[in-house]
Amino acid sequence: MHTILLAEPVAPVTADFSNDTWWIWLIKAVAILVFLLTSVLFAIWFERKVVARMQVRPGPNVHGPFGLLQSLADAMKLLFKEDMTVKAADKVVYIVAPLIAVFCSLLTFAVIPLGPTVSMFGVETPLQLTDFPVAVLYILACASVGVYGIVLGGWSSNSTYPLLGGVRSTAQVISYELAMGLSLVSVFVLAGSMSTSQIVSSQTQLWWFLPLLPAFVIYVISMVGETNRLPFDLPEAEGELVSGYMTEYSSMKFAWFFLAEYINMLNVSAVATTLFLGGWRAPFIPADHFLQQGWWPVLWFLAKLWALMFFFVWVRGSVLRFRYDQFMKLGWKVLIPAALAWLVLVAVVQGLRQFPEFADLELRTILFVIAGIVAVGVVISLFVPEKKRPEPATPPRVLDAFADGYPVPPLPGQVLPPSPRRARVPAGAPGEPDEPDAQTDTKEVHGG
Amino acid sequence: MSAALSAAALAADLTSSLPAVGALPRAVDSAGDPSTAEAVLFWVLAPVMVLASLGLLFARKAVHAALSVILVMICLAFMYVTQGAVFLGVVQVVVYTGAIMMLFLFVLMLVGVSTADSLVETIRGQRWIGWVAGLGLLVVLAGVIGTAAYPEPTGLGSANEASNPVGIAHLIFGRYVFAMEVVGALLVTAALGALVYTHRRRLTPRLGQRERAEARVRDGQHLAPLPAPGVYAKHNAMDVPALDPYGQPIESSVPRVLRVRGQEADAAEYAARIDRVLAGKAAVDRGTSASDEQGTTAPPHAEPQSAPIGEPRIADAVAGVDAGAPDSEEGK
């Protein structure tokens, strides 16, 4: 396979938009909008149906064939609900917050390549609205602005649960966006570009999820965190925060948040497809085959997209919600260091390949060497005896007021030695307290 | 208002990036003159940015001021993109708007919605000091801009020759690599300093969920939450104790405060009262002969000592089920 070197001038953008006219842009933009909105309706039905099957029940099956019109009915019902604005809310921010969430989620698909160049009413044009040299960063930017919708919605409701949801969401986004961005950087390094069409065309031989498996795993974990889905749905944890940041929203404003969440799921799935899973390419079919050209690749793209959506639902159906501190620990102490270490490794390998001695080294050889090192490491780690947990050193219960030769105050948990003056307490002290009532003495435990 | 504009601006991004399709925007020609599109966008965005900046100064609520800053940042990013600095524009949004302002907001959000900034001076004369310092900054900036000598513009074509990110990479990691490393070292030092300042030595071992659970089992405490008042009783008021399976009231189900004050109700009395009401009599026993007949039925009062513990009587339970009644959804 051809190795792409950084030193070689990589075309900033592969897709050629030079034939596009204004009505081609209009058709593509409207098509993306329609695709996203109908996909959300389908995704809600899909999720309910799949989760239902996992729980051995039929799921929605009344409205339309297979219950397909259920989410349409739900959307209509939401539209006709009373649109309430909380009296104590910060009105402007309260109304704008869902708008931010939805608008930003609609922006991402503009740079996602859905297929190769096709002929659209006689015009040769790529199946992609636009592309530029930093398209993937643009996706990250849209996502990070979109979170303002959640954060501001939680704050402006002027209510405790939404505020907690908003605060959680802020911390969640800051910590998981780092890991997400770092895992994407290793794709940039290998593909030599940040434009989506260029990244797809760099995966002609090998999809990046295979050589960059750790980055792919980190991306998949952080994309679930980024979209507030189970097991990371802490901003809207219904068992703890009613429904988090959208507790005080109703009717269409609530529907907007809902819409944004599902569009964001589609967005991150599309990004994973484009960056790691070969974009619109079908596996095992040569690039010049008719199935890899024209409109066919849209089918492959959608298949990968919905496979990832199924993964979302599968995870939701099988994993419990994380505790907040566990979630933060996973983000900061596992994902970010792992992503950093992996990035350094990828950069070193890619840097070595710049030297003429290594220039003809195949990526596959490097992969096998790395896999061998990892396998040896795993085997060695099996022989390392497990470390015993050290007993925590507890300070002596009774205070030694001159420990180490200096006067020291009592540490928490230490008790003072019996006072020498205690013996002087007069004998007529108050008697023993009454026998405690067996029923009322039971120690109370709150919250299990 | 500001956030509304930012949302609108973002929505406009879809259209504003359209002219950029294909070739990079050639906003500035080789003579350094802006194109018409850039001029139009500037005159649309500039008033918005000025208004948002004024909003930062005059907003009463801290969060509104932060939103104004976010709006200015996003408009600035659009400016960068129209001038051909795509990378700078997008990174401006990712880093400053997405991360740093989010951190600001994180702190500001903990201040409630209804709190406005107080205008009381905490330092004497701070307003005058602020004015003087602001004027000084203005003079310095004006001096720098007035005396700056601009190089001849080479045009975007040569600046973005090997795509915009590559051009920036050559500048940052080539000509200005030392300055970048210095800034990086400064940031790392600052982060370490913050870590050191907030670090607190732990004096006692950390008590996590596991340790608490283990301690609870070791001490023989209730492992589950206490029963709520009124469970199995005939009344669900806060002061009516729950009944255990033998019909005995569980004192600990009533909140401790009520118990300390002696305000808990008598479960048997409540049950008797309800039975009287169900029998069509007055709730309060007036001592009439009618109430003596059936009104004062005591609650089911089993003997805890003689009650069978251990094996559940499945056969009895099954026999007790009315076979004719629909027992599930499918039966209906």
Image (spheres, coloured by chain):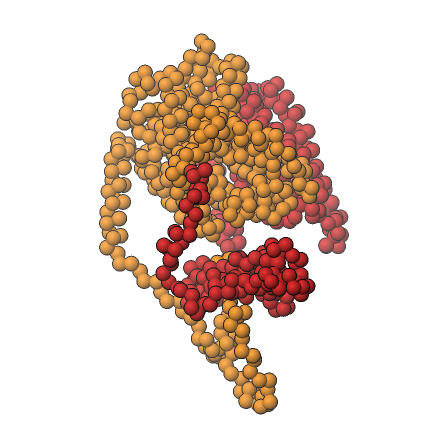
Q: Residue at x 23, y 55 (%)?
A: A383
Q: Is residue A185 visible in this depiction of the protein?
A: no
Q: Position of residue A120 (x, y in %)?
A: 45, 12
Q: Position of residue A27 (x, y in %)?
A: 51, 16
Q: Residue at x 50, y 55 (%)?
A: B195
Query: Position of A201 compared to A419: left or right?
Result: left
Looking at the image, which is closer to me, A153 or B70? A153
Q: Colour of chain A?
A: orange
Looking at the image, which is closer to me, A294 or B43? A294
The relative height of residue B273 versus residue A289 in the rendered view (above or below) is below
The relative height of residue A389 versus residue A351 in the rendered view (above or below) is below
Q: Which quadrant would the N terminus of chain B be assigned to in this image? A: top right
Q: Quadrant of residue A181?
A: top left
Q: Position of residue B146 (x, y in %)?
A: 67, 33
The relative height of residue A67 versus residue A30 in the rendered view (above or below) is below
Q: Which quadrant would the C terminus of chain B be assigned to in this image? A: top left
Q: Position of residue A343 (x, y in %)?
A: 38, 41
Q: Residue at x 59, y 58 (%)?
A: B275
Query: Position of B80 compared to A211: left or right?
Result: right
Q: Quadrant of residue A211?
A: top left
Looking at the image, which is closer to me, B237 or A166? B237
Q: Is residue A157 visible in this depiction of the protein?
A: yes
The relative height of residue B166 versus residue A158 in the rendered view (above or below) is above
Chain with red colouring: B
Q: Residue at x 47, y 13 (%)?
A: A19
Number of numbered discs on residues: 0
Query: Position of A373 compared to B277: left or right?
Result: left
Looking at the image, which is closer to me, A100 or A52? A52
